[in-house]
């Protein structure tokens, strides 16, 4: 306990019991927020939450780096085991929660090949989609210098990844369209979908046009289908926004 927490660790974090999520309402944070809300509906899982204002760089403070040396959210701390076990990286948190708490595999699969497909799609988005969309956002919105090649490169790669999802969902090479990425028939909603959805749903924020997205009709239907789920709506709500819910915000800065 002494190694994981210090006197600088916010009380809401070090005094938490059960599962404790440190997050902010970014696409990566929303992945875990959504799965926790889904597990709450499905099997009554409970957890507590702390929010970080990322603009203050609280996530770079020593107390946080002890939990996650990468200095990123979300970070999950499992206090149901001793010593408490921190889990970093949003995809790893999804896999941890589904493996440990989803006993009926409602958001995963028992079949080894189907489980492998879940991991494949999670890693594909984590390695190919997420970095490109993130860099597209950076060079289009945040960079002090607008570099046309960088903007074009990352936009094009993100659209290419969207097309991979479109191929999968449309059944272009199988003859059978799908509602979800993994599972027999039309598929079944799982962490494979949760892992990519918060990013892809933000295509407008990423400054893709309606005309560009029109080439992905099955992907757009997938976005809307998942958005209709009550747990998803809670998982992306202002409850997880540090500006909108300051009562859950933790800070060591004066």
Image (spheres, rainbow, N blue to C red):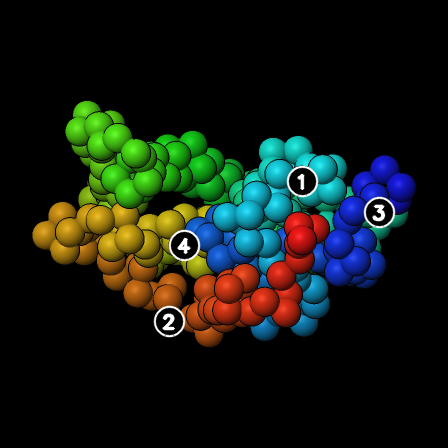
Label annotation for residue 61: 1
CA gap, disc 2 and disc 1: 37 Å
CA gap, disc 4 and disc 3: 35 Å
Mark with earlier residue (4, 1): 1
| Image spot of residue 199 (x, y percent) | 38, 50
| Image spot of residue 194 (x, y percent) | 46, 54
* The N terminus, quarter of image: top right
Mark with earlier residue (2, 1): 1
Query: What is the crowding at mark 4: few (fewer than 14 residues within 10 Å), some, or many (at least 20)?
Result: many
Residue beneath label 2, please?
228
Secondary structure of the residue carrying tag 1 is loop
**Picture layout, residue 30 above or below residue 233:** above
Residue 77 is at least partly visible in this image: yes
Query: What is the crowding at mark 2: few (fewer than 14 residues within 10 Å), some, or many (at least 20)?
Result: few
CA gap, disc 4 and disc 1: 27 Å
| Image spot of residue 69 (x, y percent) | 66, 33
Q: Left or right of 83: which side holds 147? A: left
Label annotation for residue 7: 3
| Mark toward the viewer: 4 or 3 | 3
Query: What is the crowding at mark 3: few (fewer than 14 residues within 10 Å), some, or many (at least 20)?
Result: few
Task: State if disc 3 and disc 2 touch (CB < 8 Å).
Answer: no
Secondary structure of the residue carrying tag 2 is loop
Please tell me which residue lies in front, 63 or 110: 63
Q: Left or right of 166: which side holds 10? A: right
Q: Left or right of 31: which side holds 19? A: right
Mark with earlier residue (2, 3): 3
Secondary structure of the residue carrying tag 4 is helix
Q: Residue at x 56, y 69 (%)?
A: 245
Residue 35 is at least partly visible in this image: no
| Mark toward the viewer: 2 or 1 | 1
Residue beneath label 4, please?
198
């Amino acid at each position: 306990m002494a190694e994981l927490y210090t006197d600088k660790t916010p009380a809401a974090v070090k005094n938490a019991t059960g599962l404790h999520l440190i997050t902010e309402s970014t696409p990566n944070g929303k992945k875990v927020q959504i799965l926790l809300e889904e597990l709450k509906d499905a099997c009554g899982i409970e957890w507590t939450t702390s929010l970080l204002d990322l603009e203050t760089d609280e996530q770079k403070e020593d107390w946080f780096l002890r939990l996650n040396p990468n200095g990123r959210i979300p970070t999950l701390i499992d206090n149901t085991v001793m010593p408490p076990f921190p889990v970093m990286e949003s995809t790893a948190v999804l896999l941890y929660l589904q493996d440990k708490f989803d006993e009926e595999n409602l958001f995963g699969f028992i079949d080894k090949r189907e489980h492998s497909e879940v991991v494949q799609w999670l890693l594909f988005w984590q390695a190919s989609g997420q970095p490109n969309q993130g860099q597209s956002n950076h060079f289009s919105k945040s960079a002090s210098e607008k570099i046309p090649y960088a903007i074009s490169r990352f936009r094009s790669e993100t659209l290419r990844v969207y097309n991979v999802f479109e191929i999968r969902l449309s059944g272009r090479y199988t003859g059978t369209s799908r509602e979800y990425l993994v599972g027999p028939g039309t598929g079944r909603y799982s962490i494979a979908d949760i892992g990519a959805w918060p990013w892809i749903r933000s295509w407008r924020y990423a400054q893709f046009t309606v005309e560009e997205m029109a080439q992905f009709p099955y992907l757009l239907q997938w976005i809307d289908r998942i958005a209709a789920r009550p747990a998803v709506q809670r998982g992306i709500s202002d409850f997880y926004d540090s500006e909108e819910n300051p009562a859950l915000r933790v800070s060591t800065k004066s």
